[in-house]
């Protein structure tokens, strides 16, 4: 919900090569909410899982770009570097919750 409440925070980490940062932030917020809700319903769980995996891949460049903004964001660079390996862990959790058979 922070994508809608404080979009400026997320706009700062959109790589400058990408167009329309506000639109991208809002769309990613919609995708997160829709994906989360979709995981709750068995009928939509598989589609939600694929959508969330695509979203996690799509936002990874912003996480990488964010590392270079450590000083501007007043965050220790090591914290931002430590976030990067979390992306595959989140992808694994989505796969496990939505896509794993059995």
Image (spheres, grey):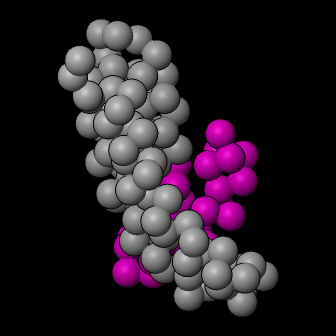
Pick the front one: 17 or 49: 49
* Residue 37 falls inside the magenta stretch: no
Seen at 26% across and 36% down, the residue is 50
Spot the residue most to the front.
102
Q: Is residue 69 above or below residue 43?
A: below
Spot the residue most to the right.
74
Residue 84, image x and y in percent?
48, 69
Residue 82 seen anywhere in this rendered image of the structure: yes
Residue 24, image x and y in percent?
45, 57
Q: Which part of the image, by quadrant, shows the N terminus?
A: top right
Q: Is residue 40 above or below residue 24?
A: above
* Residue 20 falls inside the magenta stretch: yes
Q: Which residues are magenta?
A: 1-26
Residue 73, image x and y in percent?
72, 79
Q: Is residue 80 above or below residue 32?
A: below
Seen at 48% across and 39% down, the residue is 32
């Amino acid at each position: 919900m922070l994508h809608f409440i404080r979009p400026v925070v997320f706009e700062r980490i959109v790589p400058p090569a990408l167009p329309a940062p506000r639109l991208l932030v809002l769309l990613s917020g919609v995708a997160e909410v829709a994906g989360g809700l979709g995981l709750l319903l068995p009928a939509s769980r598989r589609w939600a899982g694929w959508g969330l995996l695509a979203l996690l891949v799509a936002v990874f460049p912003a996480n990488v770009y964010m590392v270079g903004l450590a000083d501007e964001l007043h965050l220790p660079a090591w914290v931002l570097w430590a976030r990067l390996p979390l992306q595959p862990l989140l992808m694994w959790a989505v796969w496990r919750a939505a896509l794993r058979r059995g």
